[in-house]
Image (cartoon, rainbow, N blue to C red):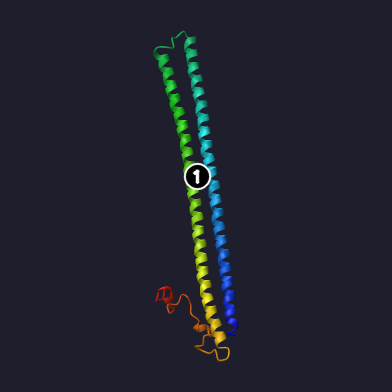
Amino acid sequence: MPVLLPALLASTAITTIGQSISSAISTKAMGEAQKATFETNARMAKLQAEDAIKRGDKAAALHAQKVKKLIGAQRAAYAGQGVDISIGSPLDIQEETAELGALDVLTIRNNAYREAWGYRAQALDYTTQGKFASLEAKARARNTLLTGGLNTLNLGVQAAYAFGGSSGGSGGSSGSGGRGDISSVPSIYSPDLSYEGFGYGGGF
C-alpha cells in the first residue's frame, strides 16, 4: 500500500491540473461567447439608431412638403378671391402656417434624435457589458488555474514525501509516525512547513 500511495497522489495531481486547465478554457470561452453576443446586440442597437435618424429625416421632409402645399393652397384660395396675399391677414396666415410647419418639422427630428440617442445608449451599455463579461471570465479562469496549480503542488509534495517514506521504509514497518503514513504527509497549506530556503522562515 505505501508503494501505491505516491502513484495514486501523482495520478490525482495530473487529473487535478487537467481538470483545472479544461475548466479555465471553458470559462474563458463562455466569457468570449457572452462578449460576442453583447457586441452583436450593440451593433443592432447602432443600426436601429441610424434607422431612427433616417426615418425622422424622411418624416420631417414629407411634413415640410405638406406645409408648402398647404401654403400654396392658401395663396391660391386668396388669389381666386382677388385678395392681395402679400399684406394683411392673408400674409399673417401664411406666415403662421409656415412657422407651425417649421415647429412640427423640428419636433419630428427631435423625436427621431431622442429615439436614436436611446439606441446609442443601449449600444454603449451592451459594449460595456461585453467587456466586463470577458474580463470576469478571464479572472475566473486565472483563479481556476491558480487554485488547480496550488492543489497540484500540494499533491506533488505529498507524493514526494510518501515516495520517500515508502522507499526508505520498505524494509521496515510503515506504522504510525512513519514517512509512508498518509497522516504524516505535509501539505503546502500547513503552517508547519518551513520556507527558510526561500528566505522565509515561517508558515503561511
Q: Amino acid at mark 1?
A: Ala
- Against 44, residue 100 (above or below) is above
Picture layout, residue 161 above or below residue 121: below
Along the viewing direction, whichever of 25 and 117 lies nearer the viewer: 25
The residue at 49%/57% (across/down) is 136
Residue 132 or residue 8, whichever sits in front: 8
Instruction: Name which residue lies at 42% across and 15% down.
Output: 91
* Quadrant of the rendering where the N terminus is positioned: bottom right
Question: Where residue 54 appears, x then y in whole percent?
Answer: 53, 33
Residue drawn where x is 58% and y is 81% of the image: 5
Question: Image point 57% across, 57% down: which residue?
Answer: 29
Element at badge 1? helix
- Quadrant position of residue 11: bottom right
- Establish if 202 lies above or below 39: below
Residue 104 falls in image quadrant: top left
Q: Residues within 10 Å of mark 1 (few under 14, many from 20)?
A: many
The one nearer the camera, 59 or 138, is: 138
Residue sitting at the far bottom: 172
Residue 15 image point, x, y percent: 59, 71
Q: How many numbered marks appear?
A: 1
Q: Position of residue 155 (x, y in %)?
A: 53, 75
- Indicate the quadrant containing the C terminus: top left, top right, bottom left or bottom right: bottom left
Q: Position of residue 95 (x, y in %)?
A: 42, 19
Q: Which residue is mark 1?
A: 123
